[in-house]
Image (cartoon, grey):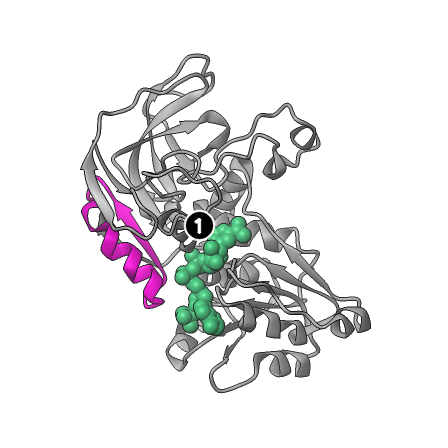
Amino acid sequence: MRVAQVSAANGPFELVERERPNPGPNSVRVAVDACGVCHSDTLTKTGAWPGIVLPRVPGHEVIGRVDAVGPGVEGWKVGQRVGVGWHGGYCGRCDPCRRGQFFACVTGPPVTGISHDGGYGDYMIAPVTSLARVPDGLSATDAAPLMCAGVTTFNALRNSGARSGDLVAVHGLGGLGHLGVQFAAKMGFQTVAVARGADKAPLALSLGADRYIDSTVENPASALAAMGGARVVLATVTDSEAMSAMIGALGVEGSLLVVGAPPAPLAVSAFALIGGQRRVQGWYSGVSIDSEDTLAFSVRTGVRSMNEVLPLARASEAYDRMMSGKARFRVVLTPRGE
Ligand SMILES: NC(=O)c1ccc[n+]([C@@H]2O[C@H](COP(=O)([O-])OP(=O)(O)OC[C@H]3O[C@@H](n4cnc5c(N)ncnc54)[C@H](OP(=O)(O)O)[C@@H]3O)[C@@H](O)[C@H]2O)c1
Ligand SMILES: [Zn+2]
């Protein structure tokens, strides 16, 4: 099989042949049909994830079919369509798991494309606890970005405390943001998209935003404050200064919901937090059942990722395209040339 691996921090993607691996206990081999390219793949590409062992194959927005099952696997059949996301499984036995906080599993938790090889390849091995069922109504390329960009924004918004009609801003219109705008609109929020550049305005409105704010010509915090202040700002950008400035967009008891992961720390005024009892909260993707909810919601409501599709052999170009900010909006790799 072919994989696109990274074997040195900041090194190039290498397209190499490997033996097709056999699944161990409670794991399956997945024949990959599509894998989205997420900004978090930088953590593999740059070697920035603490303790990451290279070479490693990135990719945590995977849609494929079960190709082989390991010992002890129940409930998953060869040929079945599956999705694999960022959250690469959990033990189910530690205290956080027993409380349903699977994201905080003390085993790590394993992360697809970081602790073990991901979906930039013809095949990958996945623990069964990371597998989501995929509805028939979604093609592999439609479904792949929903396995991270989708579930992260859907899950963050549905747990945000915002109610129908509340003012919700989505900051950043990349892979996560363009799905976040669609989910926010379909969930019945008054949805404002905030991004850089006039060219994104018609796209934002076509995705369901009630209003688009171009942060290169208008101060988005002031504009949102003038609208009454946002109940939630879903922050998907990769720049900490831009994200920090959105504290000023929040209304009383508003939340800055941090899903974007800028490397530099956020700077937040204590007075802004205290004065309006505002919050800054992080949100960590979701587990496989959250992905299944995301896929089902997307089928039902018509939320779809806008994709640029490239074959696996062009993984390097796909990654560069994502990093350039020019992709509209998600780049998806297709090992089988879909
Ligand atoms: N919490 C989680 O579980 C989770 C899950 C997935 C991803 N993430 C993180 O979420 C972030 C977004 O991922 P993605 O795949 O959506 O990335 P992406 O497609 O590359 O989009 C990044 C976005 O950041 C914006 N941006 C970058 N620099 C900016 C600046 N200086 N000012 C304003 N906006 C700026 C870009 O806007 P322009 O188009 O204007 O450049 C773009 O909208 C990444 O940090 C990723 O690691 C977190
Ligand atoms: Zn991701």
Quarter of the image holding residue 77?
top left
Q: Position of residue 274 (x, y in %)?
A: 80, 69
Q: Is residue 183 left or right of residue 318?
A: right
Q: Establish if 79 lies above or below 37.
A: above
Quickly name the residue at label 1.
48
Q: Is residue 166 left or right of residue 332?
A: right
Pick the residue in front: 68 or 18.
18
**Camera sees residue 265:** yes
Residue occupying image coordinates x 62% and y 60%: 257
SS under mark 1: loop
Residue 260 part of the magenta-drawn span: no
Dot 1 amino acid type? Ala
Q: How many marks?
A: 1
Q: Position of residue 329 (x, y in %)?
A: 36, 62
Q: Is residue 238 left or right of residue 100?
A: left
**Camera sees residue 207:** no
Residue 330 part of the magenta-drawn span: yes
Q: Which stretch did the figure color magenta?
A: 312-338
Q: Position of residue 39 (x, y in %)?
A: 41, 55
